[in-house]
Image (cartoon, grey):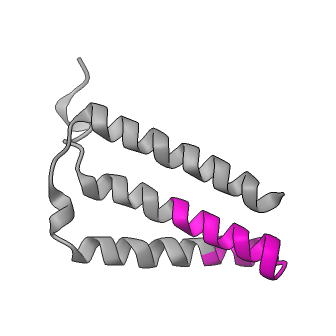
Amino acid sequence: MPPEDLMMKEPTIKKVAYGFAMAIAIIIVHFIDARVYAIPPIFALFLAIFVTYLGIVLINKSDKLNKPISRTKYNLINAVVVFILFIAYFTISV
């Protein structure tokens, strides 16, 4: 058994929302880069970091997202977010 400090703490909706914020940032930046204006890669990276930061700031302001969820639900939601990110990324590219 790993030491207690190395184990993942109890999953919460807030942790899922962090991943969702990052996925939205990636989709927005990729959409702008592919459909609106060709952004140099370094600026796309900084824009994605900035949009992710804004999302995290908004998430941290909400106390409603501190509710714990089961590890199974946490993993399923994360898998769905990754799947949607994958589909959206390639849909925008086409």
Left or right: where 58 falls relative to 63: right
Name the residue located 84 percent from the left edge and 78 percent from the top edge.
38
The image quadrant that residue 35 belongs to is bottom right
Q: How many marks?
A: 0
Question: Which percent across, then down, holds residue 33?
Answer: 78, 74
Quadrant of the drawing holding the N terminus: top left
Prevailing SS of the magenta stretch: helix
Left or right: where 50 falls relative to 75: right
Residue 38 belongs to magenta span: yes
From what the image shows, is residue 23 above or below residue 57? Answer: above
Residue 71 belongs to magenta span: no
Question: Which percent across, then down, holds residue 57?
Answer: 34, 77
Question: Which percent across, then down, holds residue 94?
Answer: 84, 57
Residue 65 appears anywhere in the view: yes
Name the residue located 56 percent from the left edge and 50 percent from the top edge.
84
User: 19 and 41: which one is in front?
Assistant: 19
Name the residue located 45 percent from the left edge and 75 percent from the top edge.
53
Residue 7 appears anywhere in the view: no
User: 64 and 40: which one is in front?
Assistant: 64
Left or right: where 59 falls relative to 67: right
From what the image shows, is residue 60 above or below residue 17? Answer: below
The range drawn in magenta is 23-47
| In the image, farthest residue toward the bottom | 37
Name the residue located 38 percent from the left edge and 36 percent from the top edge.
76
Left or right: where 1 falls relative to 93: left
The image quadrant that residue 4 belongs to is top left
Question: Which percent across, then down, holds residue 62?
Answer: 21, 73
